[in-house]
Amino acid sequence: MHTSGGSQDENDDVSRTPSASIVDALLDNARNRRHLGQRLAEEGDRVSTEELVDIVRHRPLLELLLDGPRDRREIEERLDVSKATSHRFTQWLDTAGLGERIDHRVQLTGRGTAIAEELLRFEANVRTAHRLTPLLDAICDDHDEFFVEPFVDATVTTAEPEDPYRPVERFIELARASRTLRGFNTTHMAPLVLGEFHQQVFEETETELIYLPSIVEKLFETYPEHASEAIERGHLTLRTRDELPYGLVLFDDRIGIGGYDRSTGLMQVFVDTDAPIARQWGERVYESLRADSEPFDSRA
């Protein structure tokens, strides 16, 4: 609910942030989607493979008509097809119930519009899955609620043979620009040997991290005075958990996920985005692990 006293910027921020119910619905869908085939089979209402192939094959036509009605000549010119082909196109739309003729022009029906939009969303998700391949290979054994839609426009930084530290550099770039930092398993993103970076974390950034107990020990072995002082000043809060999956970090306005090679410990990919739904998903994941972690007492 908006109040009349809020600034326009505040109202814009609220309007861009998905409500908890939307994120819950997306997470429920992610949990249940693997069972969709079984449910559809039980209902006996599966779409035939041939019909699905036809819809995908006609993607350019459906996408064109999403912009509005077209006559036959426009279809032929825009899609670079013959008169015979455009005729087959319009016949297919009519037979499938996805298009209709009005005043010598072809337009999508309501069903056709919905299917065209879902087809484009499917294509976007397939493209995103291709881009996120290194991350998906790294995290999906640990997380069955990851969904690709929020990461369509994400920045994907991968390690290359000639530049194996590109993901680390991307993480440090974002961390230096952020006033706050929360995350877990971030030593793969910024190894403890990066003293300058950890100095910033200790002195300038409001930081809360969840680490394996052994990593906390190494942190205090490496920076005993700085770490203790940061905790005493309230700049650094540490929590521990016996098991952690991939790495996740929440910046001021972005979320980052790191996938690492379990044999070497090196980060292989770092994916970051400012999409509000992705950040809400990251908040949920972080709070879930935080609730199952223990606060670290430096005095002990």
Image (cartoon, rainbow, N blue to C red):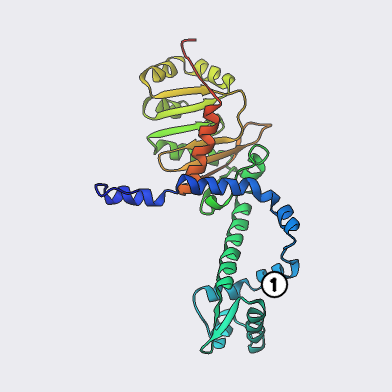
x 52%, y 73%: residue: 66
Q: Is residue 147 above or below residue 296?
A: below
Q: Is residue 96 visible?
A: yes
> What x and y, as percent, mark residue 3?
28, 48
Of all residues, the one furthest to the top in this rendering is: 300
> What x and y, as percent, mark residue 58?
64, 74
The quadrant where residue 243 appears:
top right
> What x and y, as percent, mark residue 131?
60, 52
Of all residues, the one furthest to the front in this rendering is: 43
Label 1: few (<14), some (14–19) or many (≥20) C-alpha neighbours in 10 Å: few
Q: Is residue 227 above or below residue 103?
A: above
Q: Is residue 222 above or below residue 99?
A: above
Q: Is residue 193 visible?
A: no
The one of 246 and 177 positioned closer to us in this rendering: 246
x 67%, y 88%: residue: 84
Which structural element holds mark 1? helix
Query: Mark 1 is on which residue type?
Result: Asp
Residue that carries the numbered disc 1 in the rendered image: 54
